[in-house]
């Protein structure tokens, strides 16, 4: 049997273990495109709950711990893996209702509820993922408590079974086997169970590594001296050695005509004298590091104490405002497009930076409308948006847009005189009227979907699926545009990203236009989005 303190520490330990190893989980992502990163999303999700748990005293009940953890995970949930994780612990919380302590049977029943909640929330559950790892762990716990009701045996059994199931995920998902990895979400869950087991087995909590920003350390030298020295004819070749006698050399580069150095010392005069004996000084800089350190520390202290600025300010529902809109996107140009179309609030996010449920909820509740439509514009954000809709204090309709062009098409189809139901139907239908392509780069070497991909190579995707790879941007973009159009296509729009100039974008637009039927209008619009050089829509 465990009490609230033990469960609290187990959850925090699990969170710390995952956060410490999130890079390992991120590395398991098989898709070569710069990704939202499973490990990062899961660690931010569970880390949000751990922060709330750390505030609790030792006299808490397991019910209180489970409830607070579930609420923290829910609000901090990012990406599909994070949402699934939050659902597991949300269901677990329901199983702990009314309990001051918990037996092994209680733990098994609660995790089973969590697995059921997660499976129900996923439209098309895929085996070989975190869902499978969680389900098999819960099944093993249910089996164990039939002959051993101890929490030690139950949680250890869950941990061992999660490891066994994780090892089998490549046999369940061919893409994992081909890539030679296990499922990233499942690995994250194993690390959580491992951290929990560490506490339950002997009371040892896994501690975070590098979780907090360190204040500047006190310095042992007073001065920092930097200079460039042009070597004189009579200079010796022992300059670096001579300098080292006066302090700690931070950087030293020597070329054919001289040297450049950066040294920390208590004898700046002697350093400069030594340098003058070597040659002619230039670009000389002497700084008192004690003064600099004091200023830096003061600046650090101010930053540490400064309250976080709230981007979204809560607004009561205005009975006179029927509809409001929240959109998720990244890039000034795309933000401007959605604002021009009537969006009240924009949540910054997308690929590589999935916003949390809390982020979306804050934007919704800063929109003073009776009904708020939310456009996630990314398949990995839809579930977080759905969770925000559940806990918002006003009516929320999530339009499951998977790309930015889909979100734009949905906004264009809105009719202010139509009902909620009519608009929901029209906006959902609009999602099917646009075909989206994206051009980005390979984040790693990969063998994916029959393509042998090298890091840095250009990748072209149609509706999220790889279609072309190569090094020629014009060729990649024109081939992708041709693959997107149909007989009904009348317009192609090219949204160019933050790393693309207007001149480059116009060049790509012109090339695409020359390869398409003359009846199709081709436009280039500044999107300013990160990650994707170009987002191309055909409608």
Image (cartoon, rainbow, N blue to C red):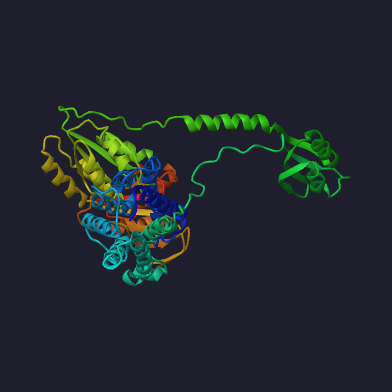
Q: Nearer the viewer, residue 419 or 441?
A: 419
When asked about the image quadrant of residue 459, the answer is bottom left
When asked about the image quadrant of residue 192, the answer is bottom left
Residue depicted at x 23% and y 45%: 409
Residue 178 spot, x, y in % from top left? 39, 71
Q: In this rendering, does residue 419 appear at all?
A: yes
Residue depicted at x 15% and y 44%: 424
Q: In this rendering, does residue 520 appear at all?
A: no
Residue 329 spot, x, y in % from top left? 33, 43
Residue 177 spot, x, y in % from top left? 38, 71
Quadrant of the snapshot with the N terminus: bottom left
- In the picture shown, does residue 532 fall above or below 374? below
Outermost residue to the right: 234
Q: Nearer the viewer, residue 182 or 401?
A: 182
- In the picture shown, does residue 195 fall above or below 326? below
Q: Tell me: 25 left or right of 327.
A: right
Q: How many marks?
A: 0
Q: Nearer the viewer, residue 509 or 84?
A: 84
Q: Tell me: 23 left or right of 333.
A: right
Residue 128 spot, x, y in % from top left? 31, 66
Q: Nearer the viewer, residue 219 or 183?
A: 219
Residue depicted at x 72% and y 48%: 253
Q: Tell me: 126 left or right of 208.
A: left
Residue depicted at x 27% and y 53%: 92
């Amino acid at each position: 049997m465990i009490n609230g303190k033990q469960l609290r520490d187990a959850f925090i330990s699990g969170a710390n273990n995952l956060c410490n190893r999130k890079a390992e989980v991120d590395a398991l992502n098989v898709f070569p495109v710069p990704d939202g990163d499973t490990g990062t999303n899961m660690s931010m999700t569970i880390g949000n709950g751990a922060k709330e748990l750390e505030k609790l005293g030792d006299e808490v009940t397991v019910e209180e711990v489970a409830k607070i953890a579930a609420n923290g995970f829910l609000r901090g949930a990012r990406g599909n893996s994070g949402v699934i994780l939050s659902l597991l612990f949300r269901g677990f919380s329901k199983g702990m209702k009314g309990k001051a302590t918990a037996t092994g049977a209680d733990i098994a029943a609660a995790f089973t509820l969590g697995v059921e909640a997660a499976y129900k929330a996923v439209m098309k559950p895929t085996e070989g993922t975190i869902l499978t790892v969680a389900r098999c762990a819960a099944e093993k716990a249910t089996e164990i408590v039939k002959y051993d009701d101890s929490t030690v045996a139950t949680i250890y059994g869950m941990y061992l079974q999660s490891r066994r199931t994780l090892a089998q995920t490549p046999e369940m998902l061919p893409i994992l086997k081909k890539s030679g990895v296990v499922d990233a979400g499942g690995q994250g869950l194993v690390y959580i169970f491992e951290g929990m087991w560490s506490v339950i087995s002997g009371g040892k909590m896994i501690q975070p590594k590098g979780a907090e920003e360190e204040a500047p350390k006190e310095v042992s030298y007073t001065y920092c001296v930097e200079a460039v020295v042009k070597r004189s004819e009579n200079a010796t070749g022992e300059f670096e050695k001579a300098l080292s006698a006066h302090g700690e050399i931070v950087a030293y580069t020597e070329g054919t005509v001289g040297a450049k150095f950066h040294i920390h010392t208590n004898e700046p005069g002697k350093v400069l004298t030594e340098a003058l004996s070597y040659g002619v000084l230039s670009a000389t800089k002497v700084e008192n590091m004690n003064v600099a350190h004091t200023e830096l520390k003061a600046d650090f202290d101010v930053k540490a104490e400064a309250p976080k600025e709230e981007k979204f300010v809560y607004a009561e529902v205005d009975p006179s405002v029927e509809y409001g809109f929240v959109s998720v996107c990244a890039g000034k140009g795309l933000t401007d497009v959605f604002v021009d179309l009537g969006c009240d609030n924009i949540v910054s996010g997308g690929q590589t930076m999935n916003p949390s449920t809390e982020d979306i909820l804050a934007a919704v509740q800063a929109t003073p409308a009776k009904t708020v439509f939310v456009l996630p514009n990314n398949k990995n954000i839809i579930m977080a948006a759905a969770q925000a809709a559940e806990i918002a204090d006003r009516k929320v309709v999530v339009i499951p847009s998977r790309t930015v062009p889909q979100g734009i098409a949905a906004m264009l189809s809105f009719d202010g005189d139509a009902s909620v139901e009519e608009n929901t139907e029209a906006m959902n239908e609009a999602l099917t009227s646009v075909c989206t392509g994206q051009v980005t780069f390979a984040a790693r070497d990969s063998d994916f979907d029959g393509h042998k991909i090298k890091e840095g190579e250009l990748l072209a995707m149609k509706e999220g699926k790889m279609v072309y790879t190569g090094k020629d941007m014009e060729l990649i973009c024109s081939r992708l545009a041709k693959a997107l159009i149909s007989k009904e296509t009348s317009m192609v729009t090219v949204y160019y990203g933050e790393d693309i100039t207007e001149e480059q974008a116009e060049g790509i637009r012109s090339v695409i236009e020359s390869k398409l039927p003359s009846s199709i209008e081709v436009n280039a619009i500044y999107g300013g989005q990160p990650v994707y050089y170009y987002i191309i829509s055909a409608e």
